[in-house]
Image: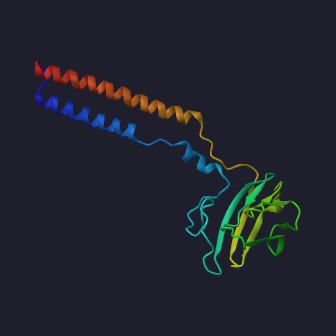
Amino acid sequence: MVSSRALNKLLMSAALLIAGCSLVFSYPSGTEDNEGMLNDDYEYDDASNVPSPQTKPAKDIGPQQNISVTVTGILGEEVVLKCDTKIGKDTVINWYRGEKIISTGTNLVQPNFSLNPSNFDLTILNSSPQSAGDYYCTRYPSGSHTFIKLVLNEHSLDIITPESSKSSQSSIHGLAATLMWSLSAVFVAALQQYKH
């Protein structure tokens, strides 16, 4: 027969192990949405003054709203630069690379670019090492600017999650389930011995 002190220790250990296993089950695993965040061309950093590429101001605030962003692209591929603004019927946007003008309104004046006339997104076609550098757009009538630093890499910097890490998560959950069932069996056996 098991002493009540030994039974209390056993029950306390079982309760702690069950609580630990339940924490494993409640730990959130990555979702497809979270894993896809790093699969884009945006450079994530801690700078608080850098707007998200998905967040656009509702309108130009004041005459001189200036924004700075960094865009990362891959050599040889198309790279899209966005003039971060709401387009109104009177809005005109000019694109520049350094001091050279690329477009005025919807008219391109430089080769190797295309321009979306509905939102003024500038696409660099077949990017080369010479495409990297500083670009900016000027919005009229407000005169505000979006400054873009374009960085080009030879390869994508996406993080590839090996399948083994996904299967190891399943293994951990399976092990936790096995431990919980085993502890339940020990707990029931201890209670039965204590009753006798």
Is residue 115 left or right of 180 when viewed as pictured?
A: right
Given residues 74 and 120, the one toward you in this image is: 120
**192 in relation to 99, above or below:** above
Is residue 170 left or right of 98 when viewed as pictured?
A: left
Quarter of the image for the N terminus: give it: top left
On the image, the x and y values in percent for residue 112 come to 86, 59
Q: Farthest residue to the top: give it.
A: 196
Given residues 9 and 42, the one toward you in this image is: 42
**133 in relation to 167, above or below:** below
Q: Residue at x 11, y 29 (%)?
A: 4
Quarter of the image for the C terminus: give it: top left
How many numbered dots are placed on residues in this image?
0
By what rule are the colours in the image chosen? Answer: rainbow
Q: Farthest residue to the front: give it.
A: 89
Quadrant of res 134: bottom right
**108 in relation to 33, above or below:** below
On the image, the x and y values in percent for residue 145 come to 69, 74
Q: Residue at x 39, y 37 (%)?
A: 25
**170 in relation to 117, above or below:** above
Q: Farthest residue to the bottom: give it.
A: 63
On the image, the x and y values in percent for residue 34 come to 54, 47
Q: Residue at x 31, y 24 (%)?
A: 182
Is residue 111 left or right of 165 when viewed as pictured?
A: right
On the image, the x and y values in percent for residue 60 come to 63, 74
